[in-house]
């Protein structure tokens, strides 16, 4: 039996202008460095400048997974690990500058993903983003299904827990919600337009060979860091 702690956090969130990127990333990096989290998955690390800020404050995370692109990590996805990394792959979603980062560890696979944002806040079948999300989640399900070992799938999915998009995806990919459906809204209500309802759109999902020992929220009292909450789980993985 192997134990692993994994976190996920959308790091940019708030508008670029006036976002105090260096200070925010300094706090995020120092918090993870002081934690006992083994693997940190981050989204919206959009440039190499963003990446350098995190690397500076997370020296114990010796293995850093990402796919290079012209201006920064492909899809804004980076996985930091204190455990040795055996391989890294990136799969781009069709017709989008979004995708999925797959990191292979000795104990299994960590999948970091970030589908397209739905700026309408409407996940009904008639919405303009519905087809895009359905296509992207189908690709993600195929990625997970093809992995030959235990997998932890996490990130900012941009679809809510109670949507048919999410329910169809986890059924197809044979995944279990590490928070057992009990995670509160992960997008901060204070960043929404008037009249919008906050949703749980960030997840840590696991395959059947993985047991969830505990699940916690991160940065709950720091709305200045991002418009998202972070998630952290402790897992035991069958050898």
Image: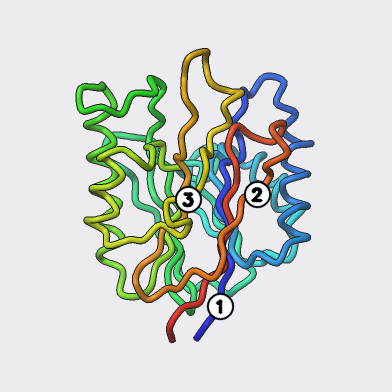
Q: Position of residue 93 (x, y in %)?
A: 31, 43
- Contact? badges 2 and 1 (CB < 8 Å): no
Q: Position of residue 27 (x, y in %)?
A: 77, 44
Element assignment for label 3: loop
Q: Position of residue 28 (x, y in %)?
A: 72, 46
> What residue would you read off at disc 3?
182
Element assignment for label 2: strand
Q: Is residue 56 shown above or below 175?
A: above
**Residue farthest along the top direction in this orientation:** 194
> What residue would you read off at disc 2?
218
Distance from the alpha carbon under mark 1 to that under mark 3:
22 Å
For the residues carrying marks 1 and 3, which lies nearer the camera in this image? 3
Task: Judge from the rendering whether residue 143 lies leftward or rightward of residue 25; answer left or right.
Answer: left
- Contact? badges 2 and 3 (CB < 8 Å): no
Distance from the alpha carbon under mark 2 to that under mark 3:
15 Å
Residue at 34% in and 51% down: 91
Element assignment for label 1: strand
Numbered disc total: 3
Task: Judge from the rendering whether residue 239 lies leftward or rightward of residue 80; answer left or right.
Answer: left
> Upstream in the sequence, badge 2 or badge 1?
1
Neighbour tally class for label 1: few under 14, some 14-19, many 20 plus, Cα within 10 Å: some
From the viewer's side, name the closer residue of 213 and 3: 213
- Contact? badges 1 and 3 (CB < 8 Å): no
Residue at 53% in and 39% down: 186
Task: Judge from the rendering whether residue 229 lies leftward or rightward of residue 122; answer left or right.
Answer: right
From the viewer's side, name the closer residue of 161 and 151: 161
> Upstream in the sequence, badge 1 or badge 3?
1
Neighbour tally class for label 2: few under 14, some 14-19, many 20 plus, Cα within 10 Å: some
- Tell me, for residue 3, which label it has, or none: 1
Neighbour tally class for label 3: few under 14, some 14-19, many 20 plus, Cα within 10 Å: few
Residue at 43% in and 63% down: 152
Q: Is residue 31 shown above or below 124?
A: below
């Amino acid at each position: 039996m192997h134990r692993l702690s994994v976190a996920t956090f959308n790091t940019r969130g708030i508008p670029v202008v006036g976002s105090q990127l260096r200070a925010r990333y300094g706090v995020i990096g120092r918090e993870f460095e002081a934690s006992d989290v083994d693997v940190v998955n981050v989204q919206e690390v959009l440039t190499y400048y963003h990446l350098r800020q995190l690397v500076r404050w997370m020296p114990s995370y010796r293995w850093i997974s990402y796919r290079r692109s012209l201006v920064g990590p492909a899809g804004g996805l980076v996985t930091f690990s204190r455990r040795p990394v055996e391989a890294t792959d990136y799969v781009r979603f069709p017709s989008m500058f979004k995708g999925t980062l797959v990191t292979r560890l000795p104990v299994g696979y960590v999948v970091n993903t970030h589908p397209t944002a739905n700026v309408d806040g409407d996940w009904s079948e008639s919405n303009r983003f519905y087809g895009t999300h359905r296509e992207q989640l189908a690709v993600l399900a195929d990625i997970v299904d093809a992995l030959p070992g235990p997998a932890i799938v996490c990130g900012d999915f941009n679809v809510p827990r109670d949507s048919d998009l999410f329910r169809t995806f986890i059924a197809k990919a044979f995944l279990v919600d590490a928070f057992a459906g009990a995670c509160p809204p992960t997008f901060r209500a204070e960043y929404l337009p008037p009249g919008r309802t906050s949703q749980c759109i960030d997840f840590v999902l696991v395959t059947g060979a993985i047991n969830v020992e505990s699940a916690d929220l991160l940065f709950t009292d720091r709305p200045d860091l991002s418009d998202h909450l972070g998630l952290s789980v402790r897992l035991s993985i069958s050898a």
